[in-house]
C-alpha cells in the first residue's frame, strides 16, 4: 500500500509534466480509436454481409447491366432459395454533393431478402401498390428532414431526367450496424419509364440478389450460376455478399491500409511521449534511487517504482482517452454520416486501446529502469549536492 | 576489549577516470570495536568516503577484505548485499536525502517496508525512532516543512529505525549551521553512549571529530 502511495506521489511531483503526458496519451488513444473505427466502418459492409446472400453482377464490371431474362435460369439452380434484382440509380436530391445511395428493388419481394431492414407491414402494402413509393433509411430520412408523404424529386445521373417519389415509409435496422442511408424504390417505376424513353435499356438490372439454402454451398452455387451464362453475351460473376462488399473496400485499399499504418504510428508516438517523460523522471531521480538502494531496496524494487509510475500515467491517459473517445466518435459519426452509414465503435477497440496503454506504460519504463538499475550507488550518490 | 564489528583488511581501491588510474585506498586496514565511534578525517580525495562506502557495502574493494558484523561484505552478491544493508547498516548522508514526497513518518518507515513487520509494528518502530530524535510531533511534516537540522534528524531516525549494527555517517553536519550541527552531534553521541551503536563518521569538522572516541586521518589512501 505504501509503495503504491509512493508511486502515486511520485507521479504527482511534476504536475504540469504529468498532466501534459496524460493529455498526450489521451489524445493519441483517441486518435487510435478514431482511426480504428474509420477502418471498421469501411469494412462494415463486409462484416455485416449476410452469409446466405450471393450477388451476381456482369463479368464485364459493375457498371454493366444484366437482362431480366436471366432470372428463371438462376431460380432453377439447386440450392437457390430466392432470386431478386436491384439497380443503382445514382441520382441526387437538390445538390449533387449530398450523396446517399438510391437503389431500385424488386418491390416487396426484393425487400424480403433483406431481413435486417425493419419495415412496417402497412408500409410494405403501400410500397407494393404505389409505383413511385419510396422507403428511406432513418439516417437519410432525418438528414433531409423529410416527413412521411413528402414528395421528393431526384435528378438521375445514370437514368436521366427528374424522378418524382413519395416517401411512404422509413426503415430501421435490426442491429446498430445496419446501413440506414438507403433510398429504396420499385424497379418497375424505373423500368417502365425506360421502356418509353430508352427502350434499349429496359429490362436490364444492375445485379442479382440470390438467397441460398446453405451458406456452406455458396462456392458451388456461385460457380453454377456463372457456368449457366458463361458462353452468353451477358456472362456473370457471382460471389458472396461479403466478397462483393470486399471488392468495394479494395478500391480504397491503399487509403484503408494507410489508416491502419497511421493508427499504429500513433502508438509509436504515444510510446515516445511516455518514454521521454519517464526518461526525464528517472534521470532526475538517479540520486534517490541510489539512496533507496543504500537503504536496501534492490533492482526489482526500483524497476517496480519506475514501471508503476509509468503504468499509472499511461493508464490514466488511456482512461481519459477512452472516456472522451465516445463523444468524439459520436461527433465524427454525425459529420461523416453520408460516407459511413453506421459509424460505430468496434467492440475490440476498447480492449485494444487499454492494451495499448498498458503496453506503452511497460515499454516506456524499460529504458529508464534499465539505466536506473545500472547506475551504481556510488555514482548515483555523487549526483547529490 | 570489545570484539571488532568492522574489520577492514589490506583493502585497495582504485578508480579509472578518463583513462587515468586513481589509487584511492592502498593496502588499508582498520578495525572498529563494537560500540566504537570512529571519525575519519582527511583532505578531499583522501579516500574517506570510499572507505565508508566499503564498510557500508555500497562499493567493493579491488583487493582485501571487508568484514562487518561477521559477514564478508565484499563476497556478497548484489541482492544479498541489499538485504544485508537493510539489516546491518544505517546510513546518514550530508544532504539528508529524504524523499520529498513522503512525510517524516513515511521516510523513516521506508527501510521497514523491506522487513516482514506488520503495519502496527512498523508504526511502533517509526514512532520510537522519531521520538528518540525529538521529532515525535513532526511525523506528518514533509521535508520541505522542516529545517535542515530537523531533516537530518529525520534521516538519523531513518538510519536507526531498523536497529542496525553499524551507523555510517558521511559528513552529517556538513550542511548545517553551528547550532543544528551541535544537536546532531549530541544525538550521535547519545546513540553511541546510551544505545551502544557503532558509528563510523566522515567529517572535515574538527569539532565533530572531537565527539568521536577515535579519530583516524586518511591521506592519499593511507591511514595515519
Image (cartoon, coloured by chain):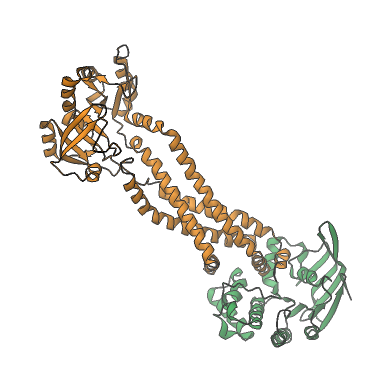
Chain colours: A orange, B green
**Coordinates of residue B96 in the picture (x, y in percent):** 67, 76
Query: Is residue A308 placed above or below A48 in the rendered structure?
Result: below
Q: Is residue A175 found left or right of B87 in the rendered image?
A: left
User: Residue at 29% across / 27% down in the picture?
Assistant: A54
Quadrant assignment, res B138? bottom right
Residue situated in front as seen by the camera: A109 or B7:
A109
Residue situated in front as seen by the camera: A278 or A156:
A156
Q: Is residue B3 among what the camera can see?
A: no
Q: Quadrant of the C terminus of chain A?
A: bottom right
**Coordinates of residue A256 in the picture (x, y in percent):** 43, 37
Residue situated in front as seen by the camera: B140 or A26:
A26
Quadrant assignment, res B207? bottom right
User: Residue at 26% across / 23% down in the picture?
Assistant: A79
Q: Is residue A86 among what the camera can see?
A: yes
**Coordinates of residue B66 in the picture (x, y in percent):** 80, 68
User: What is the tally of numbered marks visible in this picture?
Assistant: 0
Q: Is residue A288 found left or right of B27 in the rendered image?
A: left
Q: Is residue A49 found left or right of A148 in the rendered image?
A: right
**Coordinates of residue A381 in the picture (x, y in percent):** 71, 67
Quadrant assignment, res B219? bottom right
Amino acid at each position: 500500500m505504501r509503495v503504491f502511495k509512493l508511486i502515486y506521489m511520485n507521479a504527482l511531483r511534476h504536475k504540469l509534466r504529468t498532466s501534459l503526458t496524460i493529455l498526450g496519451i489521451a489524445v493519441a488513444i483517441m486518435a487510435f480509436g478514431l482511426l480504428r473505427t474509420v477502418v471498421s466502418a469501411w469494412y462494415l459492409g463486409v462484416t455485416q454481409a449476410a452469409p446466405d446472400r450471393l450477388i451476381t453482377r456482369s463479368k464485364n464490371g459493375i457498371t454493366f447491366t444484366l437482362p431480366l431474362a436471366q432470372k428463371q435460369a438462376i431460380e432453377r439452380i439447386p440450392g437457390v432459395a430466392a432470386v431478386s434484382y436491384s439497380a443503382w440509380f445514382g441520382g441526387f436530391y437538390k445538390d449533387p454533393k449530398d450523396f446517399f445511395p438510391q437503389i431500385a428493388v424488386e418491390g416487396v419481394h426484393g425487400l424480403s431478402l433483406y431481413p435486417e431492414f425493419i419495415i412496417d407491414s402497412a408500409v410494405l402494402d403501400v410500397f407494393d401498390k404505389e409505383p413511385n413509393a419510396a422507403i428511406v433509411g432513418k439516417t437519410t430520412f432525418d438528414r433531409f428532414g423529410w416527413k412521411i408523404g413528402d414528395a421528393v424529386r431526384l435528378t438521375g445521373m445514370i437514368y436521366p431526367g427528374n424522378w418524382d417519389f413519395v416517401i411512404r415509409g422509413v426503415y430501421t435496422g435490426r442491429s446498430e450496424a445496419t446501413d440506414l442511408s438507403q433510398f429504396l424504390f420499385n424497379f418497375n417505376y424505373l423500368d417502365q419509364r425506360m421502356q418509353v424513353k430508352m427502350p434499349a435499356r429496359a429490362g436490364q438490372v444492375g445485379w442479382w440478389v440470390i438467397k441460398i439454402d446453405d451458406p456452406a454451398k455458396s462456392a458451388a452455387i456461385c460457380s453454377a450460376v456463372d457456368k449457366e451464362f458463361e458462353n452468353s453475351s451477358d456472362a456473370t460473376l457471382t460471389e458472396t455478399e461479403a466478397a462483393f462488399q470486399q471488392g468495394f473496400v479494395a478500391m480504397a485499399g491503399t487509403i484503408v491500409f494507410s489508416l491502419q499504418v497511421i493508427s499504429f504510428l500513433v502508438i509509436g508516438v504515444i510510446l515516445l511521449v511516455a518514454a521521454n517523460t519517464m526518461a526525464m523522471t528517472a534521470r532526475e531521480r538517479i540520486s534517490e534511487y541510489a539512496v533507496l538502494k543504500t537503504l536496501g531496496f534492490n533492482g526489482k524494487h526500483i524497476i517496480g517504482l519506475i514501471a508503476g509510475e509509468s503504468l499509472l500515467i499511461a493508464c490514466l491517459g488511456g482512461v481519459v482517452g477512452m472516456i472522451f473517445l465516445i463523444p468524439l466518435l459520436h461527433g465524427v459519426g454525425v459529420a461523416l454520416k453520408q460516407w459511413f452509414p453506421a459509424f460505430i465503435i468496434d467492440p475490440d477497440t476498447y480492449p485494444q486501446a487499454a492494451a495499448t496503454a498498458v503496453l506503452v506504460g511497460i515499454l516506456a519504463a524499460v529504458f529508464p529502469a534499465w539505466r536506473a538499475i545500472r547506475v551504481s550507488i556510488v555514482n548515483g550518490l555523487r549526483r547529490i549536492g | 576489549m570489545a570484539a571488532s564489528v568492522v574489520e577492514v583488511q589490506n583493502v585497495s581501491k582504485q578508480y579509472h577516470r578518463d583513462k587515468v588510474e586513481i589509487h584511492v585506498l592502498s593496502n588499508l586496514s582498520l578495525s572498529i570495536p563494537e560500540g566504537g565511534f570512529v571519525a575519519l578525517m582527511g583532505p578531499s580525495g583522501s579516500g574517506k568516503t570510499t572507505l565508508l562506502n566499503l564498510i557500508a557495502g555500497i562499493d567493493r574493494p579491488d583487493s582485501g577484505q571487508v568484514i562487518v558484523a561477521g559477514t564478508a561484505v565484499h563476497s556478497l552478491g548484489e541482492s544479498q548485499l541489499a538485504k544485508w544493508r537493510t539489516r546491518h547498516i544505517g546510513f546518514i548522508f550530508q544532504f539528508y536525502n529524504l524523499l520529498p514526497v513522503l512525510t517524516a513518518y513515511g521516510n523513516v518507515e521506508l527501510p521497514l517496508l523491506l522487513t516482514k513487520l506488520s503495519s502496527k509494528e512498523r508504526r511502533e518502530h517509526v514512532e520510537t525512532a522519531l521520538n528518540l530524535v525529538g521529532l515525535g510531533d513532526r511525523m506528518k511534516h514533509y521535508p520541505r516543512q522542516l529545517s535542515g537540522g530537523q531533516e537530518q534528524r529525520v534521516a538519523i531516525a531513518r538510519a536507526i529505525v531498523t536497529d542496525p549494527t553499524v551507523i555510517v555517517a558521511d559528513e552529517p553536519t556538513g550542511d548545517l549551521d553551528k547550532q543544528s550541527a551541535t544537536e546532531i552531534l549530541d544525538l550521535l553521541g547519545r546513540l553511541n553512549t546510551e544505545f551502544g551503536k557503532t558509528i563510523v563518521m566522515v567529517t572535515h569538522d574538527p569539532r565533530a571529530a572531537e565527539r568521536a572516541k577515535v579519530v583516524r586521518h586518511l591521506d592519499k589512501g593511507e591511514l595515519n
